[in-house]
Amino acid sequence: MLPATPIILLGAPLIELSSVDSTNIYAMKQIQEQIAVSGSCYRTDFQTHGKGQHGRVWESSKGENLLCSYVLELKTLKMEQNWGPKDQIGLSAAVALGAQAFFAAFAGDETRIKKPNDIYWRDRKAGGILIENILRGESWTWTVIGIGFNMNQTKFSSDAPNPVSLKQITGKQWEISSMQKSLTKALDHSIGLWLENGEVETLKAFEKQIIEIPVP
């Protein structure tokens, strides 16, 4: 159960970009230039160089999908805690749980997590997460949470790894800005539970949502 007063607030301010190389790259630059505001969300209609795990490119047709990055300054979460690299494990699991809960609310309980942090519906990839962190010495100072979900796209390139969109699952067209607000609420909730309950409980919940996808 979350505290009466929310621990964090994601998604404000919301910065909307028509096109950008990558929302994660853009967010990182904002932090490096010391103009980023903790909690900000950068959302775009199109990425020219969308980033996936292990250097992969994230494919997305313009205006059809949910593409965004959130930034958080760790000292805004708990002032008394010294955040270090080991704490990244709990946050990563919490973000995956929030993303999974968001998509499951619309696509159903066949939505699961494929390690380390892809979101699958049955055996098809619906979304992905790329978290990048900034360290100063042994202190974890900022995190950039990049998330991409297939919303309305119905045609994918032949080399895409078995993708699926929410429109393909439900037959409905989805309004991206509304879905982004729903994602923000789900992440607020899951990260709040991590902060309230700790890493061990978060990882237990994470493991319950894992799906094993055979390598083709």
Image (cartoon, rainbow, N blue to C red):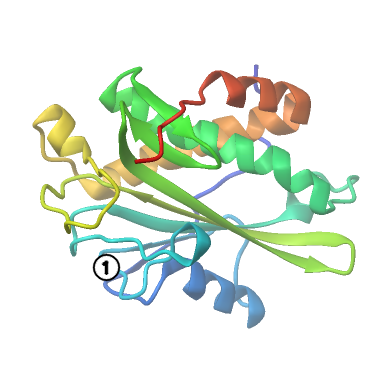
Mark 1: which amino acid?
Answer: Phe
Q: Is residue 93 above or below residue 152?
A: above
Q: Is residue 131 above or below residue 214?
A: below
Residue displayed at 17% across by 56% down:
158
Asked whether 207 or 28 is in front, the reply is 207
Q: Which residue is mark 1?
A: 46
Q: Position of residue 83 (x, y in %)?
A: 84, 51
Q: Is residue 5 visible?
A: no
Q: Is residue 183 left or right of residue 108?
A: right
Query: What quarter of the picture does the C terminus occupy?
Result: top left
Q: Is residue 101 above or below residue 90?
A: above
Q: Position of residue 168 (x, y in %)?
A: 13, 36
The residue lying furthest to the front in this view is 216
Residue displayed at 63% across by 43% down:
92
Mark 1 element type: loop
Q: Is residue 102 left or right of residue 177?
A: right
